[in-house]
């Protein structure tokens, strides 16, 4: 009952790694009571009768639940249907429903920026909540070392101006969630506020039988939890998700060394509210989350809230930046009407988002008034004279913004009249809580915020028509890069296991440098986003790039010089000059969510090494139950990829972005990461 795979799967997997026992410990599930011992004259007969009945019942239940072949038969299992149909509302579900009924309004475009007029603080209301705090002994025991005291958290918050919250999109996978968290960290820091994070995320799958993972992590219906119908058409076993505490995904103690951060459960406790009130879909509840505080006279009053609407933050044709201060002496917005400025406006209108042009576009428009068109400093001075400015951000990969890596800094140009400062607009406010409303993630650069569906399109094609949080100085840009590269990282267990597996991979190649690729399959195949539909064509594509990677590594070794990415505090990894380059025919590592056995066997037969080939049963025992969750495995694999000496991946996969950032932080040569 531990795995829903076929017997062929079990036989195959035993040759690669030892899987957990198929039966619950001592024959009893985690929640089942051991039957009382029977004494007396009929004890032997009763015991034989009980055992015979148990064996027969177990056989029948196995056929009913998994079927003869297992696998997809689980989707028709009665236990899943009963679980799916359960409608008993929890406190969290009620709170989430209330959020949904509030209906955060759909953003409407604004053509002209309107100065913010703050409404008066809300009327004082007394909120009394007396509910027991949720407990999950297995989770609490695993993450107990990460829990600071309330007094320690209260002291941390006291050093900031208040709280900053977001409506987190918990229906997204972990890497997209991480991008949102990284952006939120910057937004909170600019306002000198404590960021409130969700206490959990949803992991998409269990590497073993679904009930095995459910014994350790609460199992939910993902669509119901996040109020979405996106997965309703999938088999029932594909709609399952596991609630995983944030402490397993992020190294919170390390993050708190540089940022003031609370989990929502901690925020609620600090404000005398029950953690059970946390919404299931990640939204910051506008009423339930506001507790009481003491006014200057010692009377109870309700906490105050300011909601920043999505279109207020990032209206059409507006470029959101971190600070306006550095632009004080950068020219006059009213000067952008001359002949050369007209050339710049023409180039701006030719862009899809109508907010930003490249430096080369500006260079081309002003070439006839520049002494040296290739001089960026002279170009910036000329731009300032006519009401345009240079801003700092990062280049995407393969012409897209899916990876959100912060390793290739670039400059872009915008008209001064379109600039709005996040710090200037909201840092002066004295509300207890400021919340940025709604979905603010897809299709954007790092710290970028909103997206729109393409007009007159029936597809799900999104494109950016609004500005982003750009940076007015390279110092501000590098500050955010440090957060992404050095502050946001996996927990120690993940980092250690990834490093251990990476070293085993090097030993497999005879001590050579080794290459790795990421093959996103799974939902990418279903959605048509995969690079190649068949596993053989996909692997051939990866192998071609890995062949090129071996040549790159040989060239670096011949040159005797490592060229790291342009990131702050970059320290080149000199092992790229010590170990021998890989040879043709060496094993290569493949990180993948492919689970079809024939596909996995094909990868191995073609020279690939998989996660299950490197991890041992001792590793699993030492790591603990979370290694059964595929999202945790993906985190470990990202660390493995960061240790590889050459890396190739698909530009549409957010996993690749995290791996690229990790590689840059570890000093990899900038030529050894390729994404298309």
Image: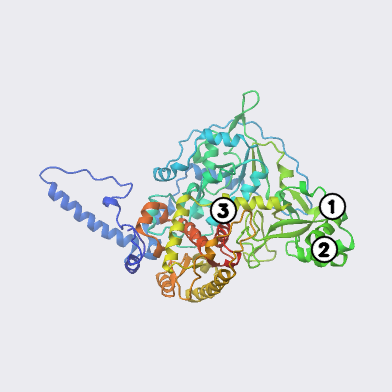
Residue occupying image coordinates x 61% and y 56%: 570
- Verify CB contact (< 8 Å) between mark 3 and mark 1: no
Residue 145's spot in the image, x, y percent?
45, 42
| Residue at the extreme right of the image, as rendered | 338
Task: Point out the tag, 2 or 3, that comes first from the N-terminus.
Answer: 3
Task: Point out the tag, 3 or 1, that comes first from the N-terminus.
Answer: 3
Q: Is residue 312 above or below residue 565?
A: above
Residue occupying image coordinates x 60% and y 48%: 167
Left or right side of 166 for 421: right
Residue occupying image coordinates x 23% and y 45%: 35
Number of numbered discs present?
3
Quadrant housing the N terminus: bottom left
- Verify CB contact (< 8 Å) between mark 2 and mark 1: no
Please rate how many residues cluster around mark 2, counting C-alpha atoms within 10 Å: few if below 14, some from 14 to 19, many from 20: many
Task: Point out the tag, 2 or 1, that comes first from the N-terminus.
Answer: 1
Q: Secondary structure at mark 1?
A: loop
Towards the viewer: 32 or 2: 2
The circle on residue 344 is 2
Say which residue label 3 marks. 178
Please rate how many residues cluster around mark 1, counting C-alpha atoms within 10 Å: few if below 14, some from 14 to 19, many from 20: some
Residue 458's spot in the image, x, y percent?
64, 66
Residue 364's spot in the image, x, y percent?
81, 67
Q: Secondary structure at mark 3?
A: helix
Q: Secondary structure at mark 2?
A: helix
Quadrant housing the C terminus: bottom right
Q: Tell me if residue 536 can be seen.
A: yes
Comparing labels 3 and 1, the label whose residue is closer to the camera:
1
Q: Tell me if residue 204 can be seen.
A: no
Where residue 425 sits, quadrant-wise, is top right
Left or right side of 226 for 609: left
Say which residue label 1 marks. 331
């Amino acid at each position: 009952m531990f795995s829903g795979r076929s017997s062929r799967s079990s036989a195959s997997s035993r040759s690669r790694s030892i899987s957990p026992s198929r039966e619950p410990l001592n024959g009893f599930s985690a929640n089942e009571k051991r039957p009382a011992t029977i004494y007396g004259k009929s004890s032997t007969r009763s015991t034989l009768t009980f055992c015979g009945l148990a064996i027969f019942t177990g056989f029948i239940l196995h056929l009913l639940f998994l079927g003869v072949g297992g696998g997809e038969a689980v989707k028709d299992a009665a236990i899943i249907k009963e679980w799916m149909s359960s409608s008993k509302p929890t406190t969290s579900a009620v709170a989430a429903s209330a959020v949904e009924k509030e209906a955060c309004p759909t953003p409407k475009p604004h053509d002209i920026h309107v100065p913010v007029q703050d409404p008066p603080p809300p009327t004082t209301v007394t909120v009394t909540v007396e509910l027991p705090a949720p407990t999950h002994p297995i989770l609490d025991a695993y993450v107990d070392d990460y829990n600071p005291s309330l007094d320690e958290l209260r002291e941390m918050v006291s050093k900031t101006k208040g709280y900053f919250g977001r409506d987190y999109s918990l229906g997204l996978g972990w890497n997209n969630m991480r991008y949102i968290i990284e952006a939120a960290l910057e937004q909170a820091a600019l306002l000198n506020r404590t960021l409130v994070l969700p206490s959990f995320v949803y992991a998409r799958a269990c590497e073993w039988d679904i009930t095995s993972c459910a014994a350790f992590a609460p199992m939910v219906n993902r669509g119901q939890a996040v109020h979405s119908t996106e997965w309703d058409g999938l088999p029932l076993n594909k709609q399952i998700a596991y609630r995983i505490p944030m402490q397993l995904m992020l190294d919170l103690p390390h993050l708190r060394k540089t940022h003031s951060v609370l989990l929502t459960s901690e925020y609620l406790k600090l404000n005398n509210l029950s953690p059970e009130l946390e919404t299931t879909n990640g939204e910051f509840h506008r009423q339930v989350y506001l507790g009481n505080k003491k006014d200057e006279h010692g009377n109870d009053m309700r906490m105050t809230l300011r909601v920043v609407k999505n279109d207020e933050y990032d209206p059409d044709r507006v470029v959101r930046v971190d600070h306006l201060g550095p632009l004080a002496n950068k020219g006059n917005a009213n000067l952008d009407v001359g002949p050369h400025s007209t050339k710049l406006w023409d180039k701006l209108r030719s862009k899809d988002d109508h907010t930003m042009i490249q430096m080369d576009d500006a260079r081309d428009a002003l070439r006839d008034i520049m002494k040296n068109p290739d001089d960026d400093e002279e170009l910036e001075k000329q731009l300032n004279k006519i009401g345009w400015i240079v801003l700092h951000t990062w280049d995407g990969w393969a012409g897209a913004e899916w990876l959100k890596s912060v390793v290739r800094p670039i400059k872009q140009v915008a008209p001064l009249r379109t600039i709005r400062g996040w710090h200037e607009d909201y840092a002066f406010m004295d509300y207890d809580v400021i919340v940025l409303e709604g979905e603010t993630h897809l299709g954007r650069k790092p710290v970028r915020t909103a997206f729109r569906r393409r007009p007159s399109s029936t597809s799900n094609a999104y494109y950016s028509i609004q500005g982003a949080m750009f940076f007015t100085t390279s110092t501000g840009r590098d500050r955010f890069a440090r957060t992404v590269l050095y502050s946001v990282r996996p927990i120690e267990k993940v980092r250690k296991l990834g490093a251990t597996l990476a070293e085993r991979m090097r030993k497999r190649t005879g001590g050579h440098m080794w290459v790795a690729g990421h093959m996103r399959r799974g939902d990418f195949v279903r959605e048509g986003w995969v690079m190649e539909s068949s596993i053989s064509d996909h692997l051939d594509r990866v192998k071609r790039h890995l062949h090129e990677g071996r040549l790159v590594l040989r060239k670096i070794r011949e040159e005797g010089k490592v060229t790291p990415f342009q990131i702050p505090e970059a320290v080149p990894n000199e092992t790229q000059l010590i170990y021998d380059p890989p040879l043709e025919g060496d094993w290569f590592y493949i990180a993948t969510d492919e689970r079809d056995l024939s596909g996995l066997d094909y990868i191995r037969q073609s020279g690939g090494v998989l996660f299950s080939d490197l991890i041992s049963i001792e590793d699993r025992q030492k790591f603990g139950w979370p290694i059964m969750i595929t999202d945790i495995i993906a985190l470990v694999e990202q660390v493995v990829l960061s240790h590889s000496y050459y890396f190739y991946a698909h530009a549409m996969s957010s996993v690749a972005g995290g791996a690229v950032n990790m590689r840059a932080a570890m000093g990899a040569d900038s030529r050894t990461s390729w994404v298309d």
